[in-house]
Image (spheres, helix red, strand yellow):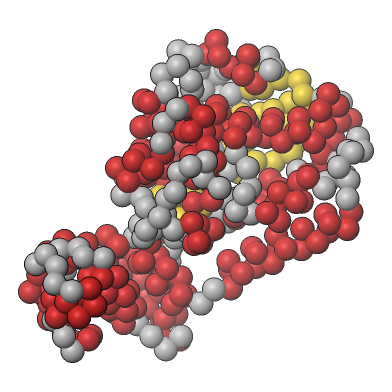
Amino acid sequence: MLAGNDLRGPVRMSEAPSHRSAGPARSVSAVVLPSWAKAAARCGFDLEPVLRAEGIELDLMQLEHARISLRQLDRVLERCIERTPDTHFPFVVGETFAFEYLPDMETFLTTSSTLRDAARVLEWIPELVNPLIDARMVETGASARIVLDLPPSVRSGEKPYHAEMFFASIIKFVRALAGQRAGLQRLDFTHSAPAYADRYTPFYGLPVAFGQRENALHCDRDSLDRKLDSDAPGLHQQAAALVEQRIARLHSRPLAERVESLLGRNLSLLGQGIEDAAKALNLGTRTLQRQLADEGTTFALIVDRVRYAQARRMLADGHRIDRISDSLGFSDRRSFTRAFKRWSGRTPKAYRDGVAGPGPA
């Protein structure tokens, strides 16, 4: 549910490598966006125009398979912050975050027997939600802490938004599960105190320190093993199995399917060649070529298939032919017309007139 924001249409995004892959994270799962839409609604604005301004249009039926580039995400975040001068948007995002499109993770959390048990979710977040989130539990003496390590690309003193959102979500879930028994003590951030630093303690409900050596949420170690009222072992085990199956499916998709998904969600790659697609998948160009050949296809064939499918959809929707040509990475309208005639046996105009009646040239 998007709190009144109905985001439909093609998904123009990229498919990202796993958090465990060798290259830097370039995208996150689009499942984060419903929570952003709820946060926007709470702050009094509609997220949809903000997304469209960054070229993002989502089909909710495919949301859990879609990706959004980190650059897009950061630009959307900046736009949202500009719209909420009186309410710090990252705080609201963290507070409203939920696993609506990952119900097995939600069930796992809400049926955990202890906070230590629930902390297993930290291992799954990079795989299923956000590869930027590298969080771990550290235990020392009578205290414990959840440490968040961010990659250099987002480790900025001026833009601490990812850390703010992460800890807002973690604290919300911990308090929902354990209530007054959560044993939370304090919150440390590596960034220096921002201009709105006076909002931190009232929002988080904890002492906050800036300029620390790590981003960390500190708690009483004993609180990790206190029994939770929500304990439901049978459901919990089933939910864990479903999450593991979901992760296994991500790693077992045929490469050709991943490439087709990537191109369909990031149309700008269609005109950029195999090198850029390989980089987006965190593969070498030769490796991508070889593995596609092993699956009996080529990058060029996949590009043609994606272009043809997208062209048919755009023509049926009444888009101008010049715009379609540009969107699909053709050098000019003439090249697009030749390609479409080769695929379908008809010109783009003849195809559109046959499907939807005469439209704009």
Residue at the extreme front of the image, as rendered:
357
Q: Position of residue 188 (x, y in %)?
A: 63, 22
| Residue 234 sits above or below residue 185 on the image | below
| Residue 302 sits above or below residue 152 on the image | below
- Would you identify the image quadrant in which residue 137 lies? top right
Of 87 and 164, nearer the camera is 87
Q: Position of residue 357 (x, y in %)?
A: 18, 74
Residue at the extreme top of the image, as rendered:
198
Residue 16 seen in the figure = no
Q: At 85% across and 35% down in the image, what residue appears?
A: 224
| Residue 210 sits above or below residue 21 on the image | above
Of 210 and 5, nearer the camera is 5
- Would you identify the image quadrant in which residue 189 lies? top right
Q: Position of residue 92 (x, y in %)?
A: 54, 28
Q: Position of residue 161 (x, y in %)?
A: 49, 30
In-image side of 310 versus 338 (left or right)? right
Of 69 and 89, nearer the camera is 89
Q: At 68% across and 45% down in the image, what residue appears?
A: 122
Q: At 52% across and 37% down in the image, what residue appears?
A: 38
Q: How many marks?
A: 0
Q: At 64% across and 63% down in the image, what residue appears?
A: 247
Residue 322 seen in the figure = yes
In-image side of 233 versus 79 (left or right)? right
The image quadrant where one finds the C terminus is bottom left
- Would you identify the image quadrant in which residue 278 lies? bottom left
